[in-house]
Amino acid sequence: MIPFELGNETVYISKEFLDRYNRQGPRYTSYPTAPEWSTDVTAEDHARSLSEINSDQKLTFYTHIPFCEQPCYFCGCNTVITQKRGLADIYLDYLEKEIESVSGKLNGRGQIVQIEWGGGTPTYFNPAQIARLFRAIKKQFTIDKSAEISLEVHPNVTTDEQIETLAGLGFNRISMGVQDFNPEVQRAVNRIERSERVEELVRLVRAKGFRSVNLDLIYGLPLQTVESFEKTIDAIVQISPDRIALFNYAHVPWLKPYQKYIKESELPSGEVKFDIFRMAIAKLTRAGYRFIGLDHFAKPDDELFRAQNERTLKRDFMGYTTHAETVLIGVGETAISMFKRMYVQNEKKLVRYQERIGVGGIATERGIRISDDDILRRTVIMNILCHMALDYRRIEEEFGISFKEYFGAGLNQLPQFEEDGLIKRDSKGFTVTPLGRIFVRNIAMTFDAYLHKPKQAKPIFSRTL
């Protein structure tokens, strides 16, 4: 039996248990998930969804900045690898056109309560370009005075001057991609990151008034061992970020070409990978972090922690976020917008994105129209993932259904979850146990109507461990 330390409790699980639950499954940054999206959704659909937003709707405004100077071999994001700095100003020209076009469709409706910049590497932009982009957003939209304004950065290519600029513009949250401090692992994935620089940057952003710092880590990278990654975890705990994201590396070189540079022979075995994961959870929870779920940890005074307690936590394609009531508006190459009845994604090719923006101001490539069944199942799945609980009566009252009749097949799987210690059930619903938080994707998958479809030739989802 394998010991698993979860806060003040240690549970013991078998290899058979792990084999049963370590299966491919969605991370549910949306429901329906991205493989179900198609090109049937058009720019006209996108524009109509924007025009239907209410005047008092709260918005999360995401901007995708795809550029990186060099590839990180593990990366699963949509990036443009280039050292041609002139492309940045050209891209900004098109971003400004898209921002103006989206604003025109909204016609003054909606208020931004969250701004997020992702990539790529947003600090590929120099200070002047950073300021130019922020001014373009501020010119076209109403931004709440208490808005959360955040971005992702690569610490080793982010300068003090850029941080000064971001702070001056009002950015108050930052996420830094660390992944692993071990030099051999860094060389194997082409991502060099000095722990000293990360510490310096964290001190600087705190001094400049940023109220939340997140550090990203990845387990399952080549050459990682329990002992080597334990040193990284110890260093992260000393840095003491407010949040930590511990992602599971998914090796899918048929989907992400740069991953072919990673030697499969150097990847840790499934058993070692799991040992790394349980060591990390034990160390982080011992250090005072709550395991929010899936891959996120937060200190008790962090807003992510409080949002889970207050049932205002939500998930979007950026992961867990703190504003359940917002509509996500995305701009930039490959950016996603998430409306109640539709998801849309922009063109993934930079040239094609710029062509589409130049012609019509909107660059929709694909998306999905969301049915009543999708909304119901999305609500159920997100309750499980965000609140670690499901109240049948709340769902019945909101949607006018009999939960037992509608979800009979899913309910039949719950006794096994309870027997395995993943949930605690009563007549009203169930709560997810500390062990269940590790396997919460498996629990949520029970209510996914799309997973019965024929399997793809190659896996399209990562494994749950």
Image (spheres, rainbow, N blue to C red):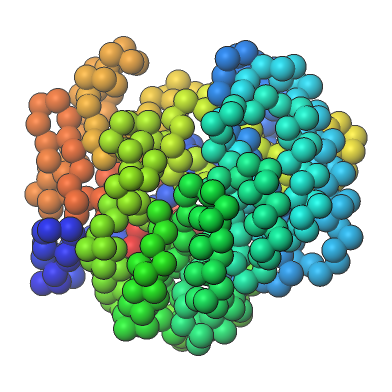
Q: In this view, does 305 lie above or below 53?
A: below
State the image quarter where residue 360 is shown: top right
Q: Where is residue 355 in the image (x, y as percent from the top left)?
A: 88, 43
For the question of whether residue 328 can be seen, the reply is no
For the question of whether residue 151 can be seen, the reply is yes
Q: Position of residue 45 (x, y in %)?
A: 70, 24
Q: Between 412 and 34, which is closer to the camera in this rendering?
A: 34
Q: In this view, does 259 lie above or below 308?
A: below
Q: Between 253 and 276, which is closer to the camera in this rendering?
A: 276
Q: Considering the image in quadrants, where does the C terminus appear?
A: bottom left
Q: Where is residue 445 in the image (x, y as percent from the top left)?
A: 33, 44
Residue displayed at 63% across by 49% down: 167
Residue displayed at 70% across by 52% down: 165
Q: Considering the image in quadrants, where does the N terminus appear?
A: bottom left
The number of callouts visible is: 0
Q: In this view, does 271 lie above or below 139?
A: below
Left or right? Give the position of 20 relative to 315.
Answer: left
Q: Position of residue 307 (x, y in %)?
A: 36, 36
Residue displayed at 56% across by 73% down: 197
Q: Between 46 and 109, which is closer to the camera in this rendering?
A: 109
